[in-house]
Amino acid sequence: MQSGFPEHPRDFLDTQHWSRPALDALLACAAAFKRERFGDDLRGKTIALVFFNPSLRTRSSFEIGAFQLGGHAVVLAPGKDAWPIAFDPGAVMDGDAEEHIAEVARVLSRYVDLIGVRAFPKFLDWAQDRKDAVLRGFAKYATVPVINLETIVHPCQELAHILALRERLGTDDLRGKKYLLTWTYHPKPLNTAVANSALSIATRYGMDVTLLCPTPEYVPDARYMQRAADNVAMHGGSLTVSHEPHEAYRDADVVYAKSWGALPYFGRWEQERPIRDAHRHFIVDEAKMALTNRAAFSHCLPLRRNVKATDGVMDSPDCIAIEEAENRLHVQKAVMAELARDSGLGARDSGHGARG
Ligand code: CP
C-alpha cells in the first residue's frame, strides 16, 4: 500500500463517509492489486467475516483476498454456527440471543484486526431497518475497523462498479456519462441496498443519473434521494426519476439493473405483489439496450436470467457484470490493506468502552 493515503474514517461503512480522494486512492490501489494479485499487506493479520445472510461473491472474495495478501479470514454465521446476538441497548435477553453485541464485538476485536459484517434488513418495518442497527452495533463496540459487507448500502459493490465502469469506458472521469439505474422484476422483494448505493456513487462521480422504477412507491428512501441530490449539487451531473422505460434507456452509456422492494409495503408484501407482477416488462432485454448508446450493462449478481435480464443481454460483449464481480476481490483487498495498516494489537485502545 502506498504511503500518504488520504485521511479517512476508521471504518468502511458507507462510501459517503469517505472523501473522493480517499475513494480514488482505494480504486488506484485496487487497480494495482488487479495487476499483481499477491502481497504481504495483511501478513500476520486476520479478519472476522460475520454473515447474517447468504453470499457467494462477498464471502469468497474476502476470504481469498485476505489469503492473497498473507492474512487469514474466519467466517461466522450467528444463529447458525455462532451464538445468536442481541443488539438492543438494555435488552433483557430472555429470547433466542445468547450474547450481546457489547461482548461479541469486543471479544472479536481481541482476536482479529478487521471485522466485516453482512446484515440485510428484516423486511418487516423499514423504520427499524433504516437504522442499520447490526452494523452500527459492531462499529460502536469494536475496537478494530469494521467493513460493511452489505446492510442497507453495499459500499464494496460500489467500488467494484466504479472500477468496472472506468475500465470499460476507458476513463477515470465519469462526469457527463448518462447512467441508468433500472428496477427489474423479481418474484421476491429484495434489499434496497444496491439501489441506494448506485444512486450514491453514480452521483458522487458526477454522472447524469436516471432512476427508472415502476411507480413512485419504488423510489428509495428519502435519505438516499437527498444524498444523491446533494452529490449532484457538489459534483455536477443530474438526477432524474422516470417510470417510462423507453424514455429512460434512450442514449444511456451505462445500464445498471437491480430489483428491490417498495418501502411503503414493508411487512405487507402481498399487497405489493400485484404492482410487482404488472411490471415484469421492466426486464433488461435486447430491444431496450438497442435504445442506448451501446451502454455497458451490469448487475451486482446474483441475477435470475430471463427474469431480470435476458440471456442475450447477459451474454452480450457489453455485459460487464463478471468484470464487476472480479473487481470485488481487488477493491476489497485495497480496503482491507488500508484499514489494517493502522489496526492491530498495538493500535487498539483498552477495549473497555463503547465508541459513541
Ligand atoms: N453482489 C454480492 O454481494 O454478491 P453475494 O451476495 O453473492 O455476496
Image (cartoon, grey):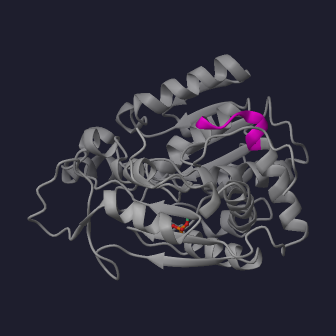
**Residue at the (79%, 50%) spot, across then down:** 27
Q: Quadrant of ligand 1?
A: bottom right
* Image location (x, y in percent) of residue 35: 91, 67
Residue 120 shows in this picture: yes
314 sits left or right of 222 in the view:
right
Extreme-left residue of the structure: 94
Reply above or below: 266 against 210: below
**Residue at the (79%, 29%) spot, across then down:** 176
266 sits left or right of 119 in the view:
left
Q: Main secondary structure of the magenta part?
A: helix
Quadrant in the rendering for residue 220: top left
Residue 294 shows in this picture: no
Queried whether the magenta region covers residue 133, the answer comes back as no
Reply above or below: 3 against 59: above
Which residues lie in the magenta part? 17-23
Name the foreground residue: 213 vs 127. 127
Name the foreground residue: 324 vs 54. 54
* Quadrant of the drawing holding the C terminus: top left
Quadrant in the rendering for residue 343: bottom right
